[in-house]
Amino acid sequence: MRPLTSLLLVAIRDFKERVMSRAFQFSTGLTILLVIAVIVAPSFFDSVGGVQWTIGTVGEVDPAMVEQVTATAPIADVTVDSTAFDDLAAAETALEDGDVDIVVAPGQIVVNDATDPTLMALVDASLMAAGALDRAATLGLSPGDLADLLTGDYEIRKIGADGTGEASNRAFAFGATVFLFISIITYGQWILIGVIEEKTNRVVEVVLGAVRPHTLLAGKILGIGVLGLAQLIVVGGIALVGLRIQDAFDVPTATAAIALAVFVWFVLGFAFYATAYAAAGSLVSRQEEAQNVAFPMTILLMIGYFVASFSLAGENTVLRIASLLPPFAPMTMPMRMASGEASVWELTLSLTLMVCAVYLLIRLAGKIYSGALLRSGAKVKLRDAWRAAEG
């Protein structure tokens, strides 16, 4: 059987085993439900507990004021109602009891400690506008003449990045980095546990009768890697669509570039760490030892994650150095790319070092994997696995 055919068969086998497992289906469904809940919940609570202001009016209050506040209030995501009172004392009693939020009477505005400052500002501005219109009419000025008098002869001009600039790009990239961090750990653990299970139940002895160890290693990484990438795309796609439907955020200017960067670094990062997880799994034969051999990879991933999280405020020397080093680049380089701080030569160097590191690690891990895979019992030392592979 050709090596490529064997590799694809192994990849398909691992892909199907994970897809059909209840654990995978449950975790995927739960993750999607959690994402939807996080997106939908805020709007639900907003609709249930929306803010409403009630204006108490006394006497002949200009109705244009109430209309102006009612029309402007939706900007603050509130609704406005009004209640008329026969005298000021009754209105003030209602204000103290919390039945109204503010009282407007001829020549005065009555508030208390609970009155929203935004409501006070809106009422004040609306009364000033209504009063200006009345005085303009007395002077024989039309609303258009008044607007000309009050409008300044200038324009508002904004320079630099727009509202969806560097800050939103960096936040979006960090969110993707968190997702990438969780995904690499999760799928790396799958490979680790899968290798240990095959050693424990002796399935690997049968498989190695038809497939070489290097091919088995590559096929396992390919199969689970494709599955992990598919899950990443599905969950991430649902999250983005849901957020856009809810109009929960403005799409960052570099969304497509960040998505491409995350894809590339996921592939490289997963190839790097999955190879290490597989080699580590081949050294032990019991599930209880899995976390011990996975500890070094987890530490490296966490270092990269913390460097990225501590760099949300902006560029720093630690982030710049970490983005060039293969173990940390998948967590840190997308952050620099999102903010436009990674130069072409830095990105080229980082990618080159990462590809070389993946190639060398696959070569080294392949030897360890092939030398330790058929050894059961106590934990296999790296030196013994290396010698067994050479033999």
Image: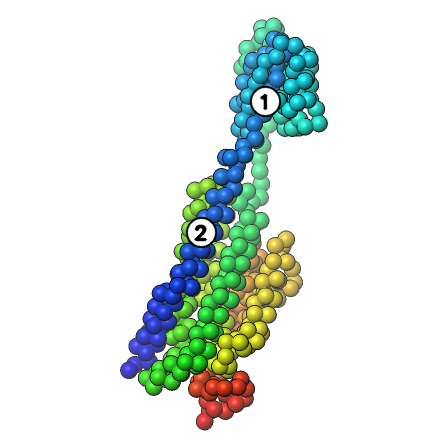
**First of labels 1, 2 by sequence position:** 2
Q: Amino acid at mark 1?
A: Thr
Eyeballing the image, is 291 above or below 387? above
- In the picture provided, is 94 more to the left or to the right than 298? right
Q: Position of residue 106 (x, y in %)?
A: 66, 11
| Residue in view at x 49 percent, y 70 percent | 189
Mark 1 touches mark 2? (CB < 8 Å): no
Q: Amino acid at mark 2?
A: Leu
Where's the N terminus, which quadrant? bottom left
Q: Nearer the viewer, residue 380 or 310?
A: 380
Element on which disc 1 rests: strand
At mark 2, the secondary structure is helix
Q: Marks 1 and 2, how far apart in space? A: 38 Å
Say if 217 sits above or below 36 in the image: below
The image shows residue 6 at horizontal and vertical percentages of: 32, 78
Q: Which image quadrant: the C terminus?
A: bottom left
**Tag 1 residue:** 54
Residue 33 is labelled as 2
